[in-house]
Structures are given as structure tokens and as C-alpha cells.
Amino acid sequence: MPDLLIELFSEEIPARMQRRAAADLQKLMTDGLVDAGLTYAGAVAHVTPRRLALSVQGLTAESPTTTETRRGPRVDAPQKALDGFLRSTGLTREQLEEQDDKKGRVFIAKITQAGRPADAIVADVLDKIIRTFPWPKSMRWGAGSLRWVRPLRRILCILSDEDGARVVPLDVDGIVSGDMTEGHRFMAPEPFRVTSFDDYEAKLKRSRVVLSSQERAEAIWQDATNQAFAAGLEVVEDAGLLAEVAGLVEWPVVLMGKIGADFLELPPEVLQTSMKEHQKFFSVRDKAGKITRFITVANRETADDGATILAGNDRVLSARLADAKFFWENDLRVAKSSVEPWLDALSNVTFHAKLGSQKTRIERIAALARELAPTIGADPDLAERAAQIAKADLSSEMVYEFPELQGLMGRYYAEAAGEDPAVAAACQDHYCPLGPSDDVPTAPVSVTVALADKLDTLAGFWAIDEKPTGSKDPYALRRAALGVIRLVLSGEISTKLLALLRVATENHLAWFTSHDEPLDPFDGIDEADLGQEQRQVKRQALYQKGEYLAARAEKIRAWTGLRISCGQQPTELLSFFHDRLKVYLRDEGVRHDVIDACLTGERTDDLADLTARARALNAFLGTENGENLLQGYKRAANILSQAEENGGVEYSYGADPKLAETEEERALFAALATTKPGIDAALSAEDYPAAMQALATLRGPIDAFFEAVQVNADNDIVRRNRLNMLSEIVRTGEKIADLTRVGA
Amino acid sequence: MSAPDAPRSFQEIILRLQTYWASKGCAILQPYDMEVGAGTFHPATTLRSLGDKAWAAAYVQPSRRPTDGRYGENPNRLQHYYQYQVLIKPSPPDLQELYLGSLKAIGIDFDLHDIRFVEDDWESPTLGAWGLGWEVWCDGMEVSQFTYFQQVGGHDCQPVSGELTYGLERLAMYVLGVDHVMDMPFNDPQTPIALTYGDIFRQTEEEYARWNFDTADTAVLLKQFEEAERHCAEILAQEAHDPKTGKRIVMAHPAYDQCIKASHMFNLLDARGVISVTERQSYIGRVRALAKMCADAFVQTEAGGWTPNAA
């Protein structure tokens, strides 16, 4: 059982690609070996900046010999059929056997596939992998045509067993396999020979290369935390940075340096971002959370214990932070005097070619925020102000340099300018929530601007027909809709979403048709592919461009304005929200059909209410009472709808208990009379779980009623009275959901 | 940086690089005589990276980035600076080692310093060019760009050129241990007439910064951009056959000069702040279109690999 060792030695592999490459090499190689008939006991892949390595233990020495029996044509078949059979099996007439079959005597071919030694299989599989490796980005070099992530320099490929190690011969575009590799680029560059994985790993360590990226990361983290601890400080955790840094070194040496006193007043996020993005430094903070030092990881030991390296890094950092400080101070100066220049500058920044500049976008969001504020319980003036300045920091020098600090810098600058704290907070929080696990803002002004921002985005991209399709969602509209859903649910905000979507849509359509340069958001799209409202906008843009039609454009504007406001877009968007809500609630275990059942009636644009109903119903259906009541309810609803259909009437007159004939009927009347007020009260308090509880008490009486009573009595008065009673039950349930749409 | 053979001035670093790359077989060329944004724009790189003819050249290229002007006050930002550029085609297998040798030649001691190759994919939208490689770090500072060209002017590079670009001021400041570029000794500080970088360039940085940011006549710049654009296309529209000499003369280089000019005009317009974000893309696209046309033309010349038989 030989062991296989492969090392693909190249120029420096980008850190971000390393982990995936190791996994790919392991999977492709082991899959290839298994497909070729070999088995193995275990495999492990490793990666450093300069090498991808794979060790496969306990590989079978050769693939088994296989024999396949194939039935051919009858022996008396025409020559043509025999020829074809010989061709397809690769055998001669003499090698065929004959055998009796149900159909007569037929030819039989026994094709033997001889086993192949592991060496040949490894060579074939590895050759193919190297030529087709799935790097996210690969390149050619020199005069060759081979592609690799960076130039590939060596292929080490050996099989080792009790008799020793042997090279698996392989030649990929002139790179000939061998059993040699080399150590650290500077500390131990001499090539050496290896005989097994253990030998390889040990010799590498002697040559100042730690093969395992995990081991490198652990060593870095341990040393970093130790050094920080010794100074009474702690390292700011950053798993992504740790993985990246471990992918930049073969022999990690941790060095800690101090941040110049000049820079300690910069916001901690700025220090951290600048150090991480530019220098790949870890931040080190004191007990009060202030960042005072940095950790850098060098790739070598030096005679001066890293003093020169640290001094160099320190100088580079100072230059970087001097830039950051320059930006910070300039920005503060602008922010404190007036935010207007920043806002004006945003009129030159395109949000989307068809949706105008960031400035026009901000104006729309501000208008919508003002409209929304009362619903959320925010001060409309503050909400409007917050929306107006929330994106001003996009013009700042700091955000230009570090886009990931957008929002956060906005908060700092708004605070410096003396804006209301609620406004400043909204500058940072209105982007949230971004991811599904992000915190959701709760302050009313922040929530208002966050909602207005997302609704405006959705209405805009919908209006220019850039809806998400399949896996494509370039403008992250699903994320925006999910953000709205999470904001509404966590704040238990009761909104008339449809009305808001209408306002957001009208804001856009008004902009399309009113701004100075008539803009055709559907440029290049054929009219025939557009909806009614979109077509009007397009037509109007075209008209407006021609001066001779100016007067006519005026009329069209008035007319389209009217038409557009009752367009289909808000309704379409609402069902997009419903789809997203289904996905969101499904993750928390609410059944699809339950949500569908709740999507009836007039209040489906109140997502908070809709969700409350769906959650209550879902929980209720999980109980025995719920499941049984559902059956009774459905029966009632069926009988009622059949009767209404046949009679062409609606049974909605109050039922009269006096007309009840049987005990069970009277009991149901009584139960209904006692429960109904409770249900109504719970419903008007929007306490759906309580309403469901109350409804559940009807389960017994309903079951008993259907057990004993024939609804369609001969006496028409009695029959109608019973139908009216069923109607009362059904209408009550409908206030929560259309229960007939819930599956069994 | 106190090794006994440490260089003492900016020019000594340049001279050592020249000597080193000459010893490695590069033709030491002189700067291109036009305003360019980076050493890559020199036809010795852009055009010579195309086609299948072997090439090895190294040169200093004065480069201009009008938006980076800081009136000579910023310790390391300049609107006019120097790049050292090496281009070898096909890229030799030991290019990394050759490069490291050049760092050693200017006095960087690998026993004390930490040299790293950090992923950096290079792309020039104006040249329609891209390549893969690294930025090279010395103790956390970027000292060079190292790129394997994959495409230039929309053409696949075959064979691939290896390109090295050193930002000379920054590298020299590091090697010489100087904190402000203007304080850097330009010639030997022991010499009777010792000159610093500031003695030579502080005034011009001021003059150009004022002109770049506030005074350059945008109407003139715009006109020159458009003229260069038009002229480039006109040059390339000419028949390859020259009626006067009767020879086949494709005028790739004169056309490329116009492309360089357009690119510089665009940079100046950008510094004057008259180009909006949306327009920016369109200007870049226009320069790229010129670069592509020039690349198309160059591969129709002998230097670009054209042979009479192939036609």
C-alpha cells in the first residue's frame, strides 16, 4: 500500500485563494484515483504561499483487472452486424465465444481490462488536474500555454512504500516531476530531496516552512495575544485577517509596534480599517477599548529580532495614518461649517444611469421619510433632516479612501456638526440591516430613514424594469426587501405598505417626467416590451426631447400623471414582499400554505399584522385542537359555499338561536355566543394567539354539531338558520385567515 | 540602512538599477519624450509587449499624475515623479530572483528585511490591458509592482511579458531613510554642490499644482483631447502602402503618440474637476478605443511580429 505525496510549487499564491485550492486539489485527486479503480485510506491537503501539497495514505498499488461480458448478434446474423460488434469490442472473430440464448446461438465477447499500476493512474490524473485546475483567475507566463495561478515551478510527485520512494514520471508543458522541493525563500532556499510525507513536513520545518496553515494561524494568534497580554492589552479579533495573514507567510514571526501619539485621537474604526486594509495589521487595544498598538506578522527571523522590519512597518503606518488624519481633519472642517458642499457634490455622482444622481435619490428618500415618520413615531422634521444628510459622507475624503466606513463617518461628522443625536445615529444605521444576521435599528428616526431608503430603491429599480430574476439580483433588491421586512417586524410597525409603495413609485415617475433633461429610463427597450405606465414615461421622454412637441408633452404629462398613479407597480411590489416574507417565515418554520391562507382579505400590506396572523395560525395548527378545528371549519366552509353557490345568495344574516332544534345545535349557538366577544376583542387587539385560543373552544361543539345535525334540513327556515350560523363561524375565522387554503 | 555599500543619493539608486539591469541583458532605454501617467505608457512597454518578438528593456520614465499634486508639501505625493520600468518578453523563469537581485543591488539586505509578494492584479482601463502579479512589500511598504501581462490593447500577450515597475521616490526614500521626499539627496550629499530633491522639484511642484488644479484652460484641453482622438484615427486610417517610398509603412507609433496625448489631456481635465463620474467612464472608454486601434496597428508592423509571408 504505497503513500502518495504531491507538491505543486509555484510563485506566490494569493492568500484568498489558498484554502479553496487545497480543498480542490484533494477532491479532484482523490475522486480521480477512485474513478480509475484505486482506493485509499486517507488524504490531507496543505497550502502555503508557495506550495499546494497533498498527501494520500494507503493507496492501492494498482487498479483491479476487470472483465466485462457482452452479448453480440446471433451467429447467423449478417456479416455487417458481426463487423460492428467486433469494432465496438475491439476483439477479433477468433476471440469471440458462442453461447445458446433464448433467441438462438449468439456471439459472446469477454473484454478484459488489465489493472494499471498506481503510478500510471496518478500521472494521468495529476496531469489532467494541473491542466484544468479551477483557479478563480489563472494566467500564462513565458512562452508557454499552461495556465496556473502564478508561474508553476516544480512538480513533486512520489509514491513511497517499504521499498523506498519513487518519482511518478510526469511532464506538464516542460515541467518534469521529481522528488525535490525547496524551503523558505530567504532563510533556507536550497533544494532538497524528500522520501515521504513525514520526511517532507519535517524537512520543511527545518527549512523554515510551517506546512499547515492552521498551525501558522494558531502560532500567530497565540504569539500575538501573548505579546499583547504581557503589555496589559488585547488583540482585536479578526478571523478573516488571521487567515489572510497566515496565507502570506511560511515562517510567521509576530512583531508588536506602537501607534504614534499624533494618531491616537483618530476614531478607532479609522485606525483599524487603515491598518487592516493597507498593512494587514491587527489592532491592539487597551482596557478602555482605545487602539494604541499594532501587530504585524513578518515572514522571517532576523539577527536584530525584527527591529529593522518593525521600524520599517512603523514608518509606513505613520505615513498612512498621516493621510487618514489629513482626511479626518479636512472632513471635520467641512462638516462643521456646512454639509451643503458635500450634498451638492452628490449631484455629480450617479446612483444609476436611469435613476439619476445620488442627490436626486436623497431628495426622494427625504420626501418619503417625512411621509413615513408619523407611522413609525418619528419626528417628521428629524426624519427628513436625517435622510437629507445620511449619505453626505459619500463626498468625504475618508469614505472616498475607505468606502467600508460609509455611514459610520456620517455619524461622526453629523455629531461634529451638532446635528440631533437621532439624526447622527440614522446616518450610520440607515444602511442596516444589510445581512440576514445584522442588527436591526430600533430608534424611530433610523428606522424611518432605513425604510425610506430601501423602499425608494425597490420602487426605482422596479420602475426601470430591473427586477431580480432567478439567481441574478445585481442591485440586491431581495436583500432590500428582507431589510424592510425585518425592520417592520422587529419594530412591530403597522404600515400601509401599499400606500407607501405608491408614494415611492410616484416619486420616481414624477422625477422621470419632470427633471430638466428629459430622461428615457427605457432607452433601448422596445415599447412593445413595456407595461402601460412605462410606455407612457418613455413616450413622454421622447416627446419632451423634441421642442415642437413641448405643448403636447404638457398634456401628456397631466394625463400620464393621472394614469401612472393608479399603476400596477405597487401591487406587483407588494407580492414581491409577500414572496420574500414567505422565504423569511419558512426559515423560522411557518408553513407555506399557512402564509398563503393569511394572504387574503384587505390587510395583506400590513406585514407585521400578516406575520402575527401567520405565526399564530402556524402555532395553533401544530396543536391537536387546531388540527381538528380546521377540519370542522373546512366542513362548515364547504357546506356554506356550496349552499351559497347553489342558492346564489349569501348567508350573512344573524342566525337565531330560537330556531335551533337539537341539543348540539343549541350547544353550538351557546358556545358561539360566549366565545365570539372574546374573539372579537382579541382580534381588535391584534392578539392573534388569544383569538386562536378562543376559536379553539368551538372545536367540541362544532364536531358534535356535525356528528348529530343535518345542515340541509327539509325545513327551509331551519336550513337557512343553520347556514347563517355556519357563516358566522366562517366569517369569524376569515378575520385571521382563509383557513380553507391550509393544507391537511 | 547602514550597510557599507548603501547608496547615498536618489541618483545613485537609479544608476545602480541601470547598471544591474544592463548586466542582466536589458537594453537601457531613455525616457519617452512625452507626458505619460506611468512607465507602462512608454511604447517600449505598451507596444513591445505585443507580438512574438523577444524583448528586454529597462528605463526611467518621468510620469505625471496631475491629481496627485500637493504643492510640494506632502511627504510623498507628487504630480511629477519617476518610475523605473523593466519589461522582458518572454518572462524568464527566474524573473522573481532577477528582481530580488535588483533590490540587493540598491542595498536592501535580505537578512534584515522582510520581502513579500502580495497579490495585486493589475489593470489599466485606459490601455485595455491587464495582468496578474503582486505588489512587492519591503517591511510592509510597497516598493514595486510585478506583473505578468496577459492582455494589452485587447490583444492576448503571447508570449507573456514580465513587467517590473519601481516607484523610485518612495523606494529611494525608504533605502535612504528619508521622511520627506523634498529632503532626499538627489546627488551625493558630500559633493560641493549638494542638491536635494526639493532643490530641484519643490518649485515645479508648486507651479504645476496651481496650473493643474486651477489655471489650465479646460476649453483648450478638451479641444486638444478631441484633436488627438481624431488625429489618431486619421493616422491609422491611412493605407499601409506609402505612395512616396512605395514601402509598406503602418504608422502605429505616431498614432500611439496621439493616444498618449489624449490620455494626458484626460488626466489634466480630471484634475481640473470638470469631468463627472459618468463622463469619466466614457473618456476612459475613448482612450481605450485609441489604445486598441494602436495595438491593432502595431501587430501589423514588423516589430509587432508581422511578416510579409503571413499576410
Image (cartoon, helix red, strand yellow):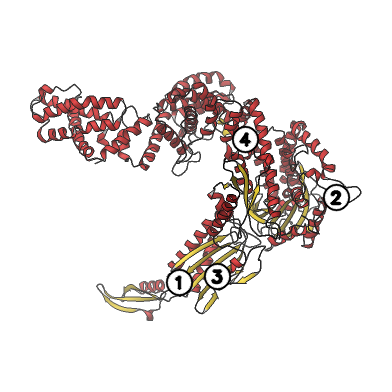
Q: Is residue A125 left or right of residue B163?
A: left
Q: Is residue A119 above or below residue B75?
A: below
Number of the label disc, if any, that sits on residue A58: 1
Q: Is residue B52 above or below residue A118?
A: above
Mark with earlier residue (4, 2): 2
Quadrant in the rendering for residue A186:
bottom right
Query: Mark 2 vs mark 1: same chain?
Result: no
| Crowd around label 2: few <14 · some 14–19 · many ≥20 (10 Å) | some
Q: Is there a contact, CB below 8 Å, between mark 2 and mark 1?
A: no
Badge 2 marks a residue whose secondary structure is: loop
**Residue at left offset 78%, top offset 56%:** B2
Q: Which residue is mark 2?
A: B187
> Which quadrant: the N terminus of chain A?
bottom left
Instruction: Point out the frontmost of discs 3 and 4.
Output: 3
**Residue at left offset 54%, top offset 56%:** A218
Q: Which residue is mark 4?
A: B278
Q: Position of residue A190 (x, y in %)?
A: 66, 69
Question: Of A50 and A497, which appears nearest the observer?
Answer: A50
Instruction: Point out the frontmost of discs 4 and 2.
Output: 2
Number of the label disc, if any, that sits on residue A608: none
Q: Position of residue B201 (x, y in %)?
A: 82, 42
The Cα–Cα distance between marks 4 and 2, rounded to whole angstroms, is 45 Å
Q: Is residue A203 left or right of residue B167?
A: left
